[in-house]
Image (cartoon, helix red, strand yellow):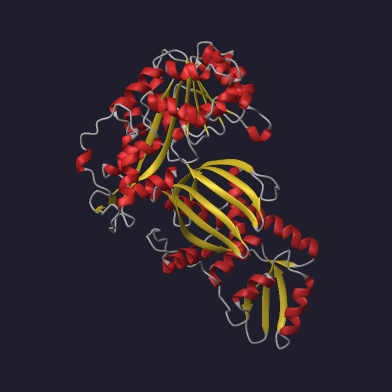
Amino acid sequence: MVDPQRIEQEQATARRARVLGMGYTDVSLIADKELYKTILSIPELRQLKAIPLRADNHHITFGVTTTTSQKTMQMLTNRFLDQQVTFTIISDAGFREYMMLYDPPRKIEYQDISISTKTDNATLEQISATLQQVRADDMLAYIVQQAFRLGASDIHLESKLEGARIRFRVHGVLHPIAILDKDKYRQLMSALASAANISTSAEYDQTGHINRDFKMATGEMVNVNLRVETVPAVNGIDGVLRIFNFNADMMRLEKLGLDQKEADVIKDIISHPSGLVLIVGPTGSGKTTTLYSILNELNNDTHKIITLEDPVEYQIEGVTQIPVVTREGESFADKFRAVMRLDPDVIMVGEIRDLDTAKTALQAALTGHLVLATYHASSAAAALTRLLDAIGENPVYASAIRLIQAQRLVRKLDDATKQVIQVPPELEKHLEDIVHGIKADVDMSWLPNAKLYEPGSSPEHPFGYDGQIAIRELMTMSPNLQKLLMRPKAEVTTEEIEKVLLEDGMLTLKQNGTLRALKGETTFEEITRTIG
């Protein structure tokens, strides 16, 4: 089939040849293209943009493009003094067509990336070599495809003096995947910037989003759905790509691994028409998944639900989702006040980032709305202390807070390979102190038979872990806590709040994590790594 674009390019090249006073050849009409591999080397063909179309002992005809310089043609004439050298203009497409014959692309063998307990230099070099050979779009698609296959949450692109390092965060831990040279990293960042609609020359941090299908050179289609965060560093642009592997069936409360008491508390809180529900924790602790699961629980014909997100990570049928572009000056607080006029029952704020948004969320929760939000804090008590800055001296705001849930994700032990360990006396005493401090209503009848485990290893799970589980602490507003919050703000500390919460029977992150380790679900080292 004739390509209309190729015909148009050939016609434009013919017109340009006439302007230059040179001959023109449409190489697409040459049925049997003869290759003269001894006249110029492949690097010379590329550098000089000149292709020998016909040659014998006395004549050489070079096909040159409209960008081939007179200096180059003079050099070729002087180089082949024993032959009569002539030149004809060919199109850029014709030049590429010949180059595919002189230097056909090597078939790229993509291999699945694997991670292991030790840095595998051979695999690292092999993946790096593969990436060096492929075009930028294929590089991006392959990296995302492999990160998704390994269950990675993020891809880290880290500029170095002579190039860049690529690492995947899998189950909360970073693993080196490949090293790129400077030029190849520049190509990757250009492809990334183009797809995410950001700039490679910006001198400030940027946020972008990619949701599109890439067709790799192998013909395979790869869906790339990422949030892109970039920042200029000393040696170039560093980036973190958050992978969105949305599965609507997984965004359910019953899929969160809640025990019955935790599920009952959350369902009771969100059954009320008003109040503030905060999900707190660091980046990568599963806050967004928890929020979306609550939204799905509430999503029915009787509720009007509006979300404010930067960016909108997953689209949910039946929910009005509004993007807030904070990098362009928009604020959650301003959009919050605007959506209040749309008569919502439930408002979800992707993240409370400032006191204005916190105060607006509390006001909405006091005036008959159920408000859901995420917040960066180390614990429920720490989140409440920070909210006091927004509450000020007004105790009425405190009554709007219905639930603060702090959470972390820890790696789950592979039951098939985990191994019992001997507990050192000092650790045993530490565990006893944690357990004896539990005043929550939890079943601990199994404790006398508790054991600690360490990870084993298998080809399927080289680190000895199989997925992740969440550990949580759930703070609800109790009379004792309300009484504490009636005191002047300056007198209320995180330590005092936590003391009251413990007396009221809250299970802290450390206590919850310790019990999960003693049940053999994870290791105590994993709890320490995640919580501190």
Residue 18 lies, in percent from the top left, at 77, 62
Residue 318 lies, in percent from the top left, at 45, 21
Residue 403 lies, in percent from the top left, at 44, 23
Residue 428 lies, in percent from the top left, at 30, 47
Compared to residue 431, the image places residue 264 above or below, namely above
Q: In this orientation, does residue 30 appear?
A: no
| Residue at the image position 26 percent from the left and 54 percent from the top | 422
Q: In the figure, is residue 113 to the left or right of 360?
A: left
Compared to residue 422, the image places residue 225 above or below, namely above
Q: In this orientation, does residue 275 appear?
A: yes
Q: In terms of image quadrants, where is residue 289?
A: top left
Name the residue nearer the viewer: 469 or 392: 392
Which quadrant would the C terminus be assigned to in this image? top left
Name the residue nearer the viewer: 92 or 387: 387
| Residue at the image position 57 percent from the left and 60 percent from the top | 164
| Residue at the image position 46 percent from the left and 30 percent from the top | 380
Name the residue nearer the viewer: 523 or 267: 523
Q: How many marks?
A: 0
Name the residue nearer the viewer: 318 or 343: 343
In the image as oriented, which residue stretches furthest toward the bottom? 82
Q: In terms of image quadrants, where is residue 198?
A: top right
